Amino acid sequence: MSETLEVKNSVPNIQQQEIEEVIKGLEQYRERIINETLEKAKKVKIPKAQAMANLSQHPELSKIDQALNKLRSGTPH
């Protein structure tokens, strides 16, 4: 019986750890998109302000931000 309690108590910890790993991965992916876009903008001499404005409309970043918000709202702090 105590084994069952231990398993039940560890499941939320495992899920929380998985959520944190997914959040970390999404944050890294988001940062990579931003960095690569800014590098390309610099090479073609697009002003940083314009590149940042373009990033604010980037569909992939929007999806990532939405996913991060959902994951974080379901994650106890």
Image (cartoon, grey):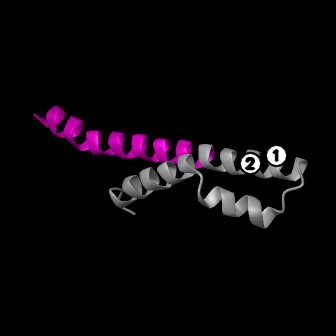
Q: Residues within 10 Å of mark 1 (few under 14, many from 20)?
A: few
Residue occupying image coordinates x 78% and y 52%: 38
> Which residue is tagged 1?
40
- The residue range painted magenta reads 1-28
Task: Measure how far apart labels 2 and 1 are at the Cα level.
Answer: 5 Å
Q: Secondary structure at mark 2?
A: helix
Q: Residue 77, position in %: x, y?
A: 40, 63
Tell me which corner region of the image, top left, top right, bottom left or bottom right, holds residue 75. bottom left
Q: Secondary structure at mark 1?
A: helix
> Would you say the magenta stretch is mainly helix, strand or loop?
helix
Q: Residue furthest bottom?
A: 49
Q: Are marks 2 and 1 in contact (CB under 8 Å)?
A: yes
Q: Nearer the viewer, residue 77 or 10?
A: 77
Q: Residue 18, position in %: x, y?
A: 41, 40
> Which residue is tagged 2?
37
Image disc number at residue 23: none
Q: Residues within 10 Å of mark 2 (few under 14, many from 20)?
A: some
Residue occupying image coordinates x 28% and y 45%: 12
**What amino acid is labelled 2 in the image?**
Thr
Residue occupying image coordinates x 18% and y 32%: 3
The question of residue 77 being in magenta is answered with no
Q: Residue 10, position in %: x, y?
A: 28, 40
Q: Quadrant of the N terminus?
A: top left
